Image (tube, rainbow, N blue to C red):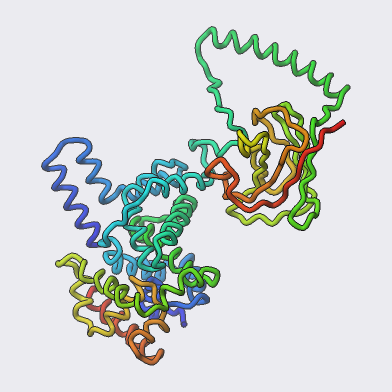
Amino acid sequence: MKLTPENFPNIADEYVLGLLNEADVIAVENEIERNAALANAVAEARERFLPLDTTVDPAAVSPVLWEAIEARLPEQAVANSRPAAPVSPVAPVAGNDNKRSGWRATAISAIAASLILAGGLVWSVTRTVEPLVVAVLVNEAGEVQAVVEDFGNDTASIKLLTDFAVPADKTMQVWTLPSREMGPMSLGLLEDRHSARLSGSALPRPQDAQLYEITLEQAGGSPTGRPTGPILAKGFAKLAR
Amino acid sequence: MSAVATAGLEYSQISECSGREDGLALATDQSTDLEGALFACAKGDRSGLRRIFDHEAGRLVAVAQRIVRRRDLAEEVVQEAFIRIWTHAHQYAPERGSARGWIYAIVRNRALNMLRDGSREDLVAEDRLETLQDSAQLEQIMGAWHRLDRNSRLKECLGRLDETRRRGILMAYVGGYTHGEIAGRLSLPLGTAKSWIRRGLLTLRECMA
């Protein structure tokens, strides 16, 4: 294929018809970026054949399809969109209450918060928090992959001990099974394949032999709220003593 | 171009006969609003994507299904295409063609990729190779031409091509067939099929110019 201007109309047609081989498709798509003449030829070819598509009998679309799309939407890098699937299921509360009493309450609570923080700082410096349970997660081959420390105060720490291969459109999600009745509950997402401290999942106090696992889910986390992807690692907790 | 003209006409008709807001909204949806919806997507507004879905998803699933054959795969194609529309909406440039053309191209590319992607061969190939399915498939492909608006320039110009060339072009665009598959179905040597299609496309461009 020669990408010369006199060939553009034919190349654009064959590109739009899907008749080019893979290498030529890549060449065309690269050239379109900087070559307005080729870009215009492709746009014209598209418009020329488009009526063959827009006159098709529409298929009946189930609402599930939209839900599946929405669950997978990554966040746009712009402010006014909704927050990404949060690590915690706790609903956000508006912080900007402009009533006067609201400001007074804010001031009081700010003072209280700084006192609590100061106290907490002293406490955390003088005392290390111990996890209630520790779970060593292994893969199918029995190799150690990660360690989960659950502190029982709605906080868990996940330390990854190996490099996980996570495709760009996927994410790692951490789960635990507090009880059969509750079923698997999400502790949160591991962004960027890093160790993390996940908090906010209000779950029952972790028990001895409670199951923890990490699964590969679509970006933004499992759309169903239950693990759907392959299990990367799992293990049972032991009470720390 | 003709799609825009038709939409413009619809717009004027509806705004003439109805001052109601929903009528107006319906009319603008037909023309410029896919563009507005893409701009909304680029700004991170999910309702923009939802508008595109409400308006086009049925046709997009049908278009994808003509290529990948199976409904479940077609829905997968549309799902992935909508994620791409969302993440790439900022790249849409109105001076480079209609919003509708841009959206359909993303779905078509996704469908063709799935078809040509080795990993999905087992899922798709069985249907494609079955000659039993072929006659129904070819009928559907030719149907796309018959369904075109009677006054459509594309319909008229495709009609002027000799049948083999018309078939080759429609098999590629509507059904996602490769040169090799078209040559096989039309019982032509590969080189002959390629040059017939090329000449058919040239005649079509001249006719529609």
To which quarter of the image does residue A83 belong? top right
Q: Does residue A191 lie above or below B127 as drawn?
A: above
Residue farthest along the left direction in this orientation:
B17
Name the spot of residue A50 as percent of width and height, x first: 30, 65
Q: Residue at x 35, y 45 (%)?
A: B51
Q: What residue do we see at 18% from left, 65% from top?
A: B149
User: Residue shown at 78%/17% (left/top)?
Assistant: A118
In the image: residue A81, left or right of residue A211: left
Q: Nearer the viewer, residue B54 or A207?
A: A207
Residue B207 visible in the picture: yes
The front one of B28 and A9 is: B28
Tell me where residue A182 appears, x and y as whole percent: 61, 34
Left or right: A22 as drawn, with respect to A233:
left
Q: Quadrant of the C terminus of chain B?
A: bottom left
Q: How many numbered marks does the figure carry?
A: 0
- The answer, for residue A5, to whether it is visible in the render is no
Give whichever of A94, A154 is nearer the camera: A154
Up-down: is B98 above or below B18?
below
Among the 4 quarters of the image, the one containing residue B200: bottom left
Residue in view at x 41 percent, y 73 percent: B127
Q: Is residue B175 left or right of residue A210?
A: left
Q: Is residue A209 above or below residue B62?
A: above
Q: Position of residue B50 (x, y in %)?
A: 38, 44
Measuring from the top left, give residue A19's x and y in whole percent. Answer: 41, 77
Q: Is residue A94 positioned above or below B30 on the image?
A: above
